[in-house]
Image (tube, rainbow, N blue to C red):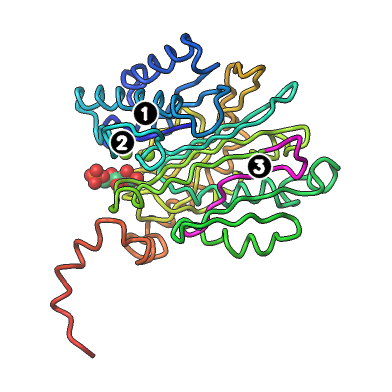
Amino acid sequence: MIKADIGSIGGHVRTCDVTTDVVCKLVAEAKESGLIIDYRVWNAGDDTEIFTTHTRGIDNEEIHKLAFDALKAGADNARERGLYGAGQDLLKDAFSGNVRGMGPGVAEMEFEERPADPVVVFTADKTAPGAFNYPICRIFADPFNTAGLVIDPKLHNGFIFDIYDIKGNQMVTLKTPEEYYDMLALIGSTENYVIKRVFSKNKQLGQAAAISTEKLYAVAGKYIGKDDPAAVVRAQSGFPATGEVLEGFALGHLVTGWMRGSHNGPLMPVPLRYSQCTRFDGPPRITGLAFSMKKGKLTEPIDVFDDPAWDITREQCMRVADYLRRHGPFEPHRLPPDAMEYTTLPNVLKKLKSRFKPL
Ligand code: F6R
Ligand code: MG
Ligand code: MG
């Protein structure tokens, strides 16, 4: 999965089908030429998402170049047609071997395909990579979420987590259940520590999840937009069931992002048709597509949050959103000062600096 905001209609609301078709065409050609096995291109709010299956492994130059070229062609089309924020996440013009560090978000994994390998691809808008900490932790480590951790011997041993310290530029690997509390001590700080990868303790099963962790401000040195992460999660037969995977999103938990990347708000699970951010540029939302695959060939997707079963979560999210909105510019709706450092706020505060006198 490689994704970027390359422009959208009517502000940072939703991508444009015409632009998405331009991206799609290049990816389709790569399927015809045999570079990739299969693909799907869609949008989460104002972000364009490219999901491909192939046998070239992670960090492959040709695959990254394909994604970069497709996103760039889409950005050019968006620019020609006056879409808003055209090319926003493509921070560099020339491709140099890997899209990592060039703006797009990346979530890749390599595994030996099982006879049937269900995979759920989550794409979020108006939020940050740390938004996945809570659901991924509940899915793979919390027995109150995932019944299989208690009653299925294939899951009972737990999982292994790679956690990135995104500000310290280092990582740590922790195992659950034995190091569960240590893991929570880190990942509760969602702006500092993010879960990057999850593995089964059963080596044969391999990797269970991959999450994009790219921080745009870290690449660009200033606020450009939120990082709007994506995650790929494998389900069933030794991994949590698809329903256990989705259950991780039932709270509508609070995440950072929303308007100007500067506010806390609930992460609302929605079907693709509702993936457009309108109220106060949000609220932050998550979409999910479930696929089955055989030898890398994908079935049609199931739009997993297109179910009245999620109505109660959505309603709760909007009640929370409405309540938070009434705080206006006050914390904890607005993010604390260290998180605001990368927004446009310091430019406003600069001019007050000389007015301060010692107490
Ligand atoms: C958040 C986001 C939007 C913009 C806001 C201001 O990730 O993309 O909330 O920050 O609409 O956008 P500009 O500065 O482009 O007018
Ligand atoms: Mg945008
Ligand atoms: Mg976005």
Q: Amino acid at mark 2?
A: Leu
Which one is earlier in the sequence, the residue at label 3 or at label 2? Answer: 2
Q: Is residue 294 left or right of residue 12?
A: right
Question: Of residues 300 and 239, which is closer to you in this image?
Answer: 239
Query: In the image, ligand 2 is in what quadrant?
Result: top left
- Spot occupied by residue 47 in the image (x, y as percentages of width and height): 38, 33
Label 2 crowd bin: few (<14), some (14–19), many (20+), radius 10 Å:
many
Q: Tag 2 or tag 1, which sits nearer the N-term?
A: 1
Total tally of numbered discs in the picture: 3
148 in magenta: no
In this figure, which residue is indicated by the disc labeled 3? 247
For label 2, being within 8 Å of ligand 2 is answered no
Q: Quadrant of the C terminus?
A: bottom left
Tag of residue 68: 1
Q: What range of the chain is rendered magenta?
A: 192-206
Disc nearer the start of the sequence (3/1): 1
Q: Residue at x 55, y 56 (%)?
A: 171
3 vs 2, front mark: 2
Q: Position of residue 45 (x, y in %)?
A: 40, 34
At 70% from the left and 40% from the top, the residue drawn is 244
Q: From mark 3 to mark 2, how far is it between C-alphas?
A: 34 Å
Is residue 59 placed above or below 20 in the rendered structure?
Answer: below
Tell me the quarter of the picture where residue 245 sits: top right
Residue position for label 2: 90
Counting other residues with Cα less than 10 Å from the Cα at mark 3, is it few (<14), some (14-19), or many (20 or more)?
Answer: some
The residue tagged with tag 3: helix, strand or loop?
A: helix
Q: Quadrant of residue 57?
A: top right
Asked if 290 appears above or below 181 in the picture, the reply is above
